[in-house]
Image: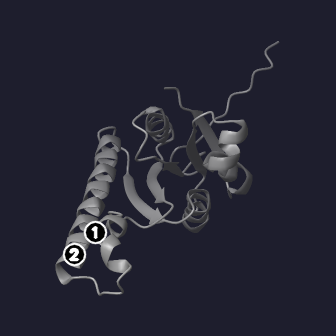
Amino acid sequence: MNNTETLSVDRDTNKLYNKILVAVDYQDVTPEVLNTAILLAKTYASELRIIYSLSKPLTPYTETFIYGNLIGYGGGYPPDMIALEQQITEEMQAELQAWLNGLVDRAKEDNITARADYYIGDPGQKICQVAQQEGIDLIIVGRHGRSGLSELILGSVSNYVVHHAPCSVLVVHITH
């Protein structure tokens, strides 16, 4: 007697995961999280939503270096310094968007419908917020394996998402 049950999903009408959201980390060059998301999106013929969340707005952090000597004197910022900061910020945004577009292209190589965006704000909260707003069925996040004091100080995006997500969450352990 065989007690094994098989999950059967009709891809056209009742997919298990219609929309998958994968949270990626710009600083992390390991491909496990994205590869897992692409594999599942391909398996379930799902749409793939790729997001990156920055805790703070993109800035070149030039205020300390360029403006440092001016702040103490109460002077205004020279227009060329403001223009330089704006130019650097725009270049950083373009670089980030190009990276995200590359991830979308990677997914499209496997015939997956995908799009990517970045957000400003607490990563865990933004991931859950986007999932709620877009009716995501599965969130995929990575976990670096921090514990103890390191996790307490740095926080854990994956832990926050697991406890606050409006849908199922798959945590991929990132090995270095």
- How crowded pointer 2 is (Cα within 10 Å; few <14, some 14-19, many 20+) is rated as some
The outermost residue toward the top is: 1
Work out whether residue 103 or residue 63 is closer to the camera in this orientation and state it: 63
Residue 29's spot in the image, x, y percent?
39, 36
* Callout 2 amino acid: Met
| Scheme of colours in the image | one colour
Which mark sits nearer the N-terminus, 2 or 1? 1
Q: Which residue is mark 2?
A: 81
Asked if the residue under mark 1 is in contact with the one under mark 2, i.e. CB atoms within 8 Å, the reply is: yes
Is residue 83 visible in the rendered image? The answer is yes
Q: Quadrant of the N terminus?
A: top right
Q: Is residue 155 above or below residue 31?
A: below
What element does badge 1 sit on?
helix
Q: Which residue is mark 1?
A: 66
Work out whether residue 12 or residue 42 is closer to the camera in this orientation and state it: 42
**Residue that appears at 52% across and 44% down:** 11
**Residue that appears at 60% across and 48% down:** 138
Residue 76's spot in the image, x, y percent?
29, 87
* Callout 1 amino acid: Ile
Residue 45's spot in the image, x, y percent?
46, 43
Tag nearer the camera, 2 or 1: 1
In the drawing, what numbered circle is on residue 94? Answer: none
Query: Which of the 4 quarters of the picture holds residue 112?
Result: top left
Work out whether residue 29 or residue 112 is closer to the camera in this orientation and state it: 29
Work out whether residue 61 or residue 39 is closer to the camera in this orientation and state it: 61
